[in-house]
Amino acid sequence: MGIQRNPHDPKTWWMAYAAQRPAWIPIMAPMAEHAQFLTGIPARQFYADAKINVHTLAALAAYYGFDNAMGVGDTYNYEAEAMGQKMIYSENAMPTVDSRVPLIKQPEDLNKIKVPDWLNAGRIGSVLDLIRLNAALGVPNGKFCAPFSLAVNIRTYPLLIKDLRKNPEFAHDLFTFLVDEILTSYLKLQKEHCAISAATAPDAWSAFPNLSPELAEKWVLPYAERLYNNCLSFGVRAVVAGSCDYCEERVEKFDKNILFKCFDIQKKLAFGMPMVLLGMGRWHEYPLEPVLEYLAQYKNNNIRAIVMAQINARLLRDGPENSIIELVKRLIDTFGRDYNLTVIMSNVPADTPPRHMHAAVSAVHTYGRLPLAENFDTVAFQIPERESFSEYIHKMSEGSGLGF
Amino acid sequence: MSDAFKKLQQAIVDGDDDLAIALTEEVLQSGIDVLEIVKAAIVPGIEQAGKLWHDNIFFMPDVVLSAEAFKAAMQVVKPHTQGRETYSRGKIILGVVAGDMHDLGKSIVIAMLMGAGFDVVDLGVDIPAATFIEKVKELKPDILGIGCYMTTTMLELKEVLRALEENGLRSTVKIMIGGVPTTQQFADEIGADAWGKDALDAVAAAKQLIEKAH
C-alpha cells in the first residue's frame, strides 16, 4: 500500500503503519495522560492545542501499534468549561473542574445558565480542530460529554444524587436543559463545522457502582435516547457509551445479577446492538464465565456479538508482564472465537512502563492473529525489545520532533 | 435504644441530611448527653451504612448520602462537644494533592474514619506539598492521609513524601494513601505505610497503623 510517510507529520507514521497491518484482534487505545507524561509536554499545551495533542497521540499509536489513532483530551470537561464552570489548570495534570465551586450551587442557578456562544467559549475551537484532525486519521467522530457526567461536572456528585432523591423535578429540568439546549446545539455545531455524522460520549460517572442499574435506567437511559433523537434530526448519531460499566472494586463483591443488569442497560444504550463492555472493572480478577453465560443469548441465535474488553489500567501500570500477557491470552481465548472482540487500553496511567505496553500489544498481535490458533500454548511469544518513545520520534522525524 | 435514637440512626442510614439535622437538634434539646447521642445514634448510623455497602446492598449514591447526613449531624453536635473529653483512636489529617479537585472519595473516607472514632482534620483538595508539611508540623497527626484521583496527580504523592523526608518529618507520621488510580504496589513504591482500597479499607488500615504504633 502506498502511504507516504512524512517525517514532519506523525499522522502519516500511523497511517503508514496501519496500511500494512495483518488481520488481528484490534486494539483501541484512547489515552492522554500516558502520552503527555512520556513526552513531557506541559498539560496546558497538551490539552488546549489540538495539533500537539493529535500529533503526539498519532505518534504514540504508531510506536505501540494500536489499531486506531486519535487525539483525545479531557473529554468530560469541554462543555462544562464553555458553560462557565470554573476549571483548575496545572502544569502536569489534566485540567479538571473545580468541584468546590459548582456552576449550579442551588437549583435556581439553572435559570441563569445560557447556551454558550460555542465558537468563542472555553476550548471549543480546539475541540473542533481535534475532530478535524482525527477525521484525517479515519476517525470522523464528534465528541461530547454524556448528560449524566456533565450534570455531575456542573453540580457535583453529592448534590446531584441528592437532587435525584429529594428534588427529582429539578433533576429532570437539569437533564432536559443539558440535552435539549446544551448538548444538542453543541453537536449541531460539530456537524456544521466538522461534518460529523456520529458522536460518542464517555460516561464514567454513571458506571456501576457510581450509579446502580436501576438509577441508570431512570436517569441515564431516557436522556441518552432523547439526545440521540434530537441529533438524528440533523443527521448525527449521538451515542452515550460506557454507562453502567461494571466496576466493582472488591472482587469478593462481584455479583453476576448486577453485571447482567449493567449489560442490559448497555444494550439499550446501544439501541439494541448485541454488545457487552468489560471496561474499567477488575476483569483480570473477575470470572469470565458469567459473561459467556450472558452472551449465550447471542451465540445460541448465531449472532456474533461485540465484546469490548479492557486491559485494566492499573494492571498495565503495575504489571508484572506475565499477568498482562496471561490476561490478553485469556480474553482472546474466551471471546476471540465466537464474538467480535476489541481489546481496549484506555485511561493508561501516566507512568506506565512502556515495556508493559509493548507486552500487552505484542500479546494481542501474537495470540490475536487471525485466524486464531487452536491452542495458544503452541504459539511462540516474546516481548520485543524496543527503543524508547523519544528515540522512536527522533528516528521517525529524522530529528525534527513531533512537528510542532 | 430510644425511639429518638432509632429515628436519628435511620435518618443517617437513609442519607436524609435535613432530617438528621432536625432529629439531632431535637434530641439535644431533650437534654440527652451529647456524647451519648454520638455514640448511640450518629456513629451507629454511619456504621450501618458501611455494613450495607460491604454487603452489596448500598451503592455509591447511598453511601455518599449517608456520609453527608452523618457529617450534617456531627456539625450540629460539634459545638456541644467542645471542652468535653472524647475518646479518639488517633488524629488523622487528610487532603487531596495539588492539581486534583476530586473529593468524593475523601468525603466518604472522612465520614467513615470519624465514625470509627478518629479525630479527622480535612485539609481539602488541591493541596500543595508545602501545605501538607506545614500542617504536619502544626497538627502533629498520627496519620497523614493523601488522596489522588488522576494518574498524573498520583505522581504528586511522591513529591509529598519527598518533602516530608527533606523536612525531617517522615518518621513522625504514618502515611496512608488512596484514590482510584493507586494500588498497593504504588504505595510500596513510594514508601507509604498503608493503602486504602476504599473507605472501609482505609478505616481498617488506619486502625492497624495506630495499633502498631502503640
Image (cartoon, rainbow, N blue to C red):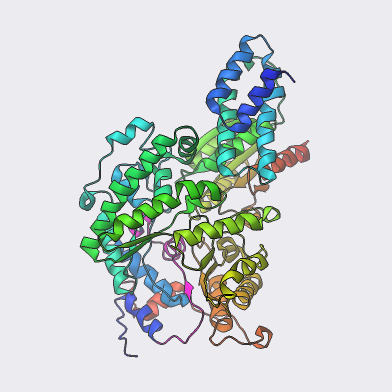
- The answer to whether one can see residue A347 in this image is no
A381 w.r.t. A359: above or below: below
Total numbered badges shown on the rendered structure: 0
Q: Residue at x 58, y 78 (%)?
A: A338
Residue A20, by quadrant, is: bottom left
- Viewer-proximal residue, B168 or A299? A299
- The answer to whether A231 appears left or right of B212 in the picture is left
Residue B114, by quadrant, is: top right
Q: Position of residue B20 (x, y in %)?
A: 58, 24
- Viewer-proximal residue, B210 or A272? A272
A242 w.r.t. B83: above or below: below
- The answer to whether A342 appears left or right of A188 in the picture is right
- The quadrant the N terminus of chain B occupies is top right
Q: Position of residue A178 (x, y in %)?
A: 34, 46
Q: Residue at x 37, y 50 (%)?
A: A77
Looking at this view, name the residue that lies furthest to the front. Answer: A301
- The quadrant the C terminus of chain B occupies is top right
Q: Is residue A317 magenta?
A: no
- The answer to whether A147 appears left or right of A283 in the picture is left
The magenta span reads: A20-46
- Viewer-proximal residue, A155 or B85? A155
B188 w.r.t. A160: above or below: below
Q: Position of residue A330 (x, y in %)?
A: 64, 74
Q: Is residue A38 magenta?
A: yes
- The answer to whether one can see residue A376 in this image is yes
Q: Position of residue A172 (x, y in %)?
A: 39, 40
- Viewer-proximal residue, A31 or A386? A31
